[in-house]
Image (spheres, grey):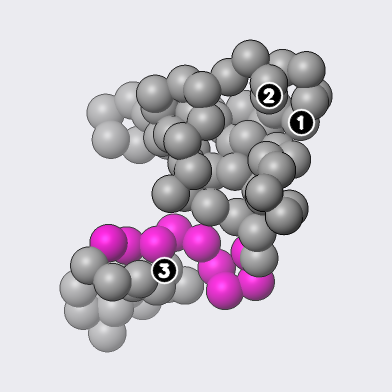
Amino acid sequence: MGGRGRPADGRAPGVRRRGRRRCPLPWGARGARLTWVDGEPGLAWVAGDEVKVAFAFQVVGGHVREIELIADPEVLATMSLVVD
């Protein structure tokens, strides 16, 4: 373990690696996918092939400052969502 309860590589507790990229999703986050929401980083909760909720992150200085949840199907239909 690294300092302050972090693994030696500096990851926050609970952050797992998937391949070469860090995956910020806890194991219980079934259906959540890393997503570009209107060109910005975020997440999407996906059921089947349909995005049910988009989580749009406002990132300032490398830190998430705000998270907006969008679940209105009419609004989701107007958004650019690129699911990883």
Task: Write the residue at 66% across / 65% down.
Answer: 30
Q: Is residue 44 above or below residue 24?
A: above
Q: Is residue 10 visible?
A: no
Question: Which image quarter holds the N terminus?
Answer: bottom left
Q: Secondary structure at mark 2?
A: helix
Foreground tag (2 vs 1):
2
- The answer for how far apart the CA atoms under marks 2 and 1 are is 7 Å
| Predominant SS along the magenta part | loop
Q: Looking at the picture, how far across and down is residue 58, in whole percent?
A: 45, 25
Mark 2 is surrounded, within 10 Å at the Cα level, by few (under 14), some (14 to 19) or many (20 or more) other residues, namely some
Q: Earlier in the sequence, mark 3 or mark 1?
A: 3
Vertical placement of residue 80 versus 42, above or below: above
Q: Are marks 3 and 1 in contact (CB under 8 Å)?
A: no
Q: Is residue 80 left or right of residue 21?
A: right
Please give the range of residues in magenta.
21-29
Which residue position is annotated with label 1? 71
The one of 57 and 48 positioned closer to us in this rendering: 48
Report whether 74 appears left or right of 7. right
Determine whether the residue tagged by mark 3 lies in a helix, strand or loop. Answer: loop
**Front one among 42 and 74:** 74
The quarter of the displayed image where residue 32 is located? bottom right
Between discs 2 and 3, the one toward the N terminus: 3
Q: Residue at x 79, y 24 (%)?
A: 72
Which residue in the protein does label 3 denote?
15
Please name the amino acid that badge 1 sits on. Answer: Ala
Q: Are marks 2 and 1 in contact (CB under 8 Å)?
A: yes
Q: Which residue is mark 2?
A: 76
The residue type indicated by label 3 comes to: Val
Spatial separation of the CA atoms under disc 2 and disc 3: 28 Å
In space, the residues marked 3 and 1 are separated at their CA atoms by 26 Å
Indicate the position of residue 16 as horizontal and vertical percent values. 39, 73
Q: Position of residue 57 (x, y in %)?
A: 49, 31
